[in-house]
Amino acid sequence: MSRIGKKPIPIPGAVQVAILGQAVNVTGPKGKLDWRMPAPITAAVETSQVVVRRPDDLPQNRALHGLTRALIANMVKGVTDGYAIGLELYGTGYSAKVDKGRLLLNCGYMGRGVGKVAQFEIPIPAGLEIKVAVPTARGNTEPAKFAVTGCDKQLVGEFAADIRKLRKPDPYLGKGIRYAGEQVRRKAGKVFAGGGAG
């Protein structure tokens, strides 16, 4: 990781990076992020780029050097371009919509979701946004589609993973929640042989 740590991080024109002690503050068009570096690692803004340094070559500090550089680079990219993870709902009648800061999902569970009531009402964390492209799935071939977007890479990934856990893809019919482009390994259904008179 130390070779990654030595690479300076370019700061785009629309982004401001402030480093005070171990505190790193990054502000850009997509938002603002704050993070605290691990103690032995230091960083400084030098001529429109961030340079990360370590005090010595101990294995732990070499690893933290690369990690710190990667996380600050993710922050800069996040406030510049943002991050997005697409999700797809497969299943007849499965749907997704956003209402009053909540993601409403219908995923085929019985006993809930009667009428227009969603089976899952998930509060959308501050700093994240849900963009619904296709609100309702049509069978197991045309999914409902939406994306989790935000400037914090970790928060986007964790929230998308939490949503996927609500209804993991079924290995037989493929119903459920998948990441966009995710291939589900399908299993063949059980075959019942007819019993012959013997």
Image (cartoon, rainbow, N blue to C red):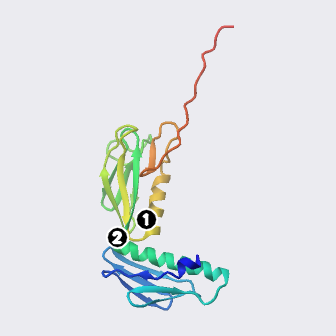
Q: Residue at x 40, y 53 (%)?
A: 87
Q: Position of residue 135 (x, y in %)?
A: 31, 48
Asked which secondary structure carries label 2, the reply is: loop
Amino acid at dot 2: Asp
Q: Secondary structure at mark 1?
A: helix
In-image side of 52 versus 126 (left or right) = right
Earlier in the chain: of badge 1 and badge 2, it is 2
Q: Is residue 120 above or below residue 47?
A: above
Cα separation between marks 1 and 2: 13 Å
Question: Where residue 156 is drawn, which disc sits there?
Answer: 1
- Crowding near the residue tagged with mark 2, few <14, some 14–19, many ≥20 C-alpha atoms within 10 Å: some
Find residue 50 and report its image quarter: bottom left
Query: Label 1: few (<14), some or many (≥20) within 10 Å?
Result: many
Give the label on residue 81, or none. 2
Q: In this view, which residue lies farthest toward the right?
A: 198
> Would you place residue 71 above or below residue 148 in this image?
below
Q: Position of residue 177 (x, y in %)?
A: 44, 48
Q: Residue at x 51, y 85 (%)?
A: 52
Q: Nearer the viewer, mark 1 or mark 2?
A: 2
Which numbered tag is attached to residue 133?
none
Amino acid type, residue under disc 1 in the picture: Val
60 or 176: nearer the viewer: 60
Residue 74, position in %: x, y?
44, 73
